[in-house]
Image: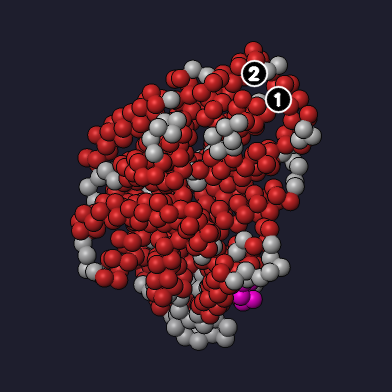
């Protein structure tokens, strides 16, 4: 097994070195490093997004949970690939691009003002250091399993995992991540399904084929484990609902998944490959579930336990080179997710904390210089708690839930309206409930109801509701960060009459800006509310040919 580990580590060293050779010379500005120069084609956006939400959830957590819940755990990747990724690629990602922002906290600032920008900038890196640590622990666990326990899990495997995850992004930034991810998608598909082919051959020769596996489960009255539509309470409350809420809501305000979308050439490049992206994300999780369920049906494999059963099956049913490909697929999944999370949070720290708060006159050259050290330090921040994971893990569920109300507020602001009072009330109340449910859980809240994500998700300010179409307020001032009050009555009609008189494009552009300058006058019910997508539509008509950034400036 140690020789397999050498092959796997060698693969990543060569891959990172080649990517560094071809990509490093193309990274000359902070935009190149953080957003790949905003020039990513749809193919790279698609393949990268297929891996970013993959991680240990689609692999190690999935095969371990299948020992208790069976094929029902496969709803995890189905929800991510069939719901979370389409929402990201069709709606929230392009909407953030329309706002002309580089990070998710900047979008919150455009919708709700500078204070909300500051809260999101601080909360997000703090919450997601826990998830980055979880991915780092998964990498360390895979390395430890590959070595057969010869390499100590703590601290040696954790240190190796730290080096690999930093090397994944520190040289070429997002451009390095997307090219490595594109190559690794092909490796994952080939390695995972090739492993199933060899396992099928072994079963035919030694265990009466697939029928032998089914008989083993029927003998202990667990044939239901092969029914994906067996919706037991565990599947519903431990898989379907938590994954839907935590992926769509908590990950929906995390910078990592948005980086490929913000770095895309056009909005069309965000949406074009959503079918391919979703299908890849779903089917690459399939081999892990099947291998684990086969392993738990055969006593000589099942004795390794749910955590190590996949590695035990791989060692005894397939050639070493195929097993090495399978393990490369495993590390590819967790490395892509962990690297994207670390880089995304490092970008937020540089742009929204260091530059915006501490050094507002910082140049782009300085931002580029400090981005790599910040990535390194953030990875250290995720690695140090890993040595004490059993003690700290309950706290991570607490921090994870901090992103849920931020997503709800963000989506309501993007789709319907913004209301500062409703947004702040929602966030403050849900954070109070989060503290209460985490540290003083009610006695009646047992089993899955003890998870703080349930009360945090349902707690929402009553003012966060759709605004009727005719009552939707006008756009904010294009130069302001936060929302402004609505137009006075008649201002829009006046600007429309002025626009019809003019025939020149330049004059039309002037009148459009004049119309937006009317904001600030009082309209009953309009104070503090705005609609950012209407702002973008009005600004796009100012002058054809101008970029979104030029118009917003």
Q: Is residue 520 above or below residue 81?
A: below
Label 2 SS: helix
**Display colour scheme:** secondary structure
Using residue 373 as the reference point, say whether residue 204 is left or right of it.
right
* Contact (Cβ within 8 Å) of mark 1 with mark 2: yes
Q: Residue at x 21, y 54 (%)?
A: 369
Residue 203 is marked as 2
Please state, as top left, top right, bottom left or bottom right, where the C terminus lies in the image. Answer: bottom left
**Res 266 visible:** no
| Secondary structure predominantly adopted by residues drawn in magenta | loop
Marked residue nearer the N-terminal end (1 or 2): 2
Q: Is residue 460 above or below residue 292?
A: below
Where on the picture, by quarter, is residue 165? top left
- Along the viewing direction, whichever of 90 and 250 lies nearer the viewer: 250
Residue 60 is marked as none
Please state, as top left, top right, bottom left or bottom right, where the N terminus lies in the image. Answer: top left
Q: Residue at x 42, y 46 (%)?
A: 136
Highlighted range, magenta = 460-465
Q: Residue at x 26, y 70 (%)?
A: 358
Residue 213 is marked as 1
Spot occupied by residue 343 in the image (x, y as percentages of width and height): 36, 51
Figure label count: 2
Q: Is residue 63 above or below residue 452?
A: above
Q: Residue at x 53, y 40 (%)?
A: 60
Where on the picture, by quarter, is residue 310? top right
**Res 239 visible:** yes
Spot occupied by residue 352 in the image (x, y as percentages of width and height): 34, 65
Q: Indicate yes or no whether the magenta region holds residue 145.
A: no
Rounded to the nearest whole Å, what is the CA distance between mark 1 and mark 2? 8 Å
């Amino acid at each position: 097994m140690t020789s397999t580990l050498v092959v796997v580590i060698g693969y990543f060293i060569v891959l990172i070195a080649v990517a560094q050779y071809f990509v490093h010379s193309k990274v000359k500005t902070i935009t190149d490093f953080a957003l790949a120069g905003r020039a990513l084609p749809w193919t790279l956006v698609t393949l990268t997004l297929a891996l970013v939400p993959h991680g240990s959830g689609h692999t190690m957590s999935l095969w371990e949970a299948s020992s208790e819940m069976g094929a029902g755990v496969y709803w995890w990747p189905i929800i991510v690939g069939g719901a979370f990724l389409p929402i990201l690629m069709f709606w929230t990602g392009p909407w953030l691009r329309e706002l002309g922002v580089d990070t998710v906290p900047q979008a919150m600032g455009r919708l709700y003002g500078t204070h909300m920008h500051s809260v999101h900038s601080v909360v997000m890196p703090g919450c997601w250091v826990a998830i980055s640590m979880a991915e780092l622990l998964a990498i360390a666990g895979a390395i430890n399993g590959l070595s057969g326990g010869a390499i100590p899990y703590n601290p040696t495997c954790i240190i190796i995992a730290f080096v690999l995850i930093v090397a994944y992004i520190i040289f070429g930034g997002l451009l390095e991540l997307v090219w490595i991810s594109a190559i690794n998608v092909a490796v994952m598909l080939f390695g995972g399904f090739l492993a199933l082919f060899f396992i099928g051959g072994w079963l035919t020769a030694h265990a009466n084929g697939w029928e032998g596996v089914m008989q083993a489960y029927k003998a202990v009255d667990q044939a239901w484990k092969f029914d994906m539509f067996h919706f037991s309470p565990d599947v519903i409350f431990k898989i379907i609902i938590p994954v839907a809420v935590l992926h769509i809501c908590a990950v929906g305000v995390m910078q990592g998944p948005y980086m490929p979308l913000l770095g895309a050439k056009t909005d069309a490049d965000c949406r074009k490959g959503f079918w391919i992206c979703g299908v890849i994300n779903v089917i690459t999780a399939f081999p892990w579930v099947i291998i684990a369920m086969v392993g738990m049906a055969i006593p000589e494999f099942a004795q390794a336990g749910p955590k190590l059963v996949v590695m035990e099956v791989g060692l005894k049913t397939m050639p070493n080179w195929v097993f090495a490909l399978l393990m490369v697929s495993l590390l590819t999944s967790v490395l892509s997710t962990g690297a994207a999370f670390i880089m995304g949070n490092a970008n937020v720290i540089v742009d929204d904390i260091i530059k915006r708060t501490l050094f507002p006159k910082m140049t782009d050259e300085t931002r580029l210089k400090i981005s790599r050290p910040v990535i390194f330090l953030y990875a250290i921040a995720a690695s140090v708690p890993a040595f004490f994971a059993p003690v700290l893990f309950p706290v991570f569920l607490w921090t994870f839930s901090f992103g849920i109300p931020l997503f709800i507020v963000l989506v309501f602001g993007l789709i319907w309206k913004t209301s500062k009072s409703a947004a702040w009330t929602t966030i403050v109340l849900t954070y109070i409930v989060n503290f209460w449910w985490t540290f003083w859980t009610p006695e009646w809240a047992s089993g899955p109801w003890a998870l703080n994500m349930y009360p945090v998700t349902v707690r929402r300010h009553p003012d966060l509701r759709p605004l009727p179409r005719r009552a939707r307020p006008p756009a904010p001032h294009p130069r302001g960060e936060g929302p402004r009050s609505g137009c006075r009555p008649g201002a829009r009609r006046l600007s429309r009459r002025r626009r019809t008189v003019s025939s020149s494009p330049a004059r039309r552009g002037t009148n459009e800006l004049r119309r937006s300058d009317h904001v600030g006058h009082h309209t009953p019910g309009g104070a503090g509310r705005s609609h950012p997508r209407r702002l973008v539509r009005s600004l796009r008509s100012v002058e054809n040919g101008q970029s979104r950034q030029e118009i917003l400036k």
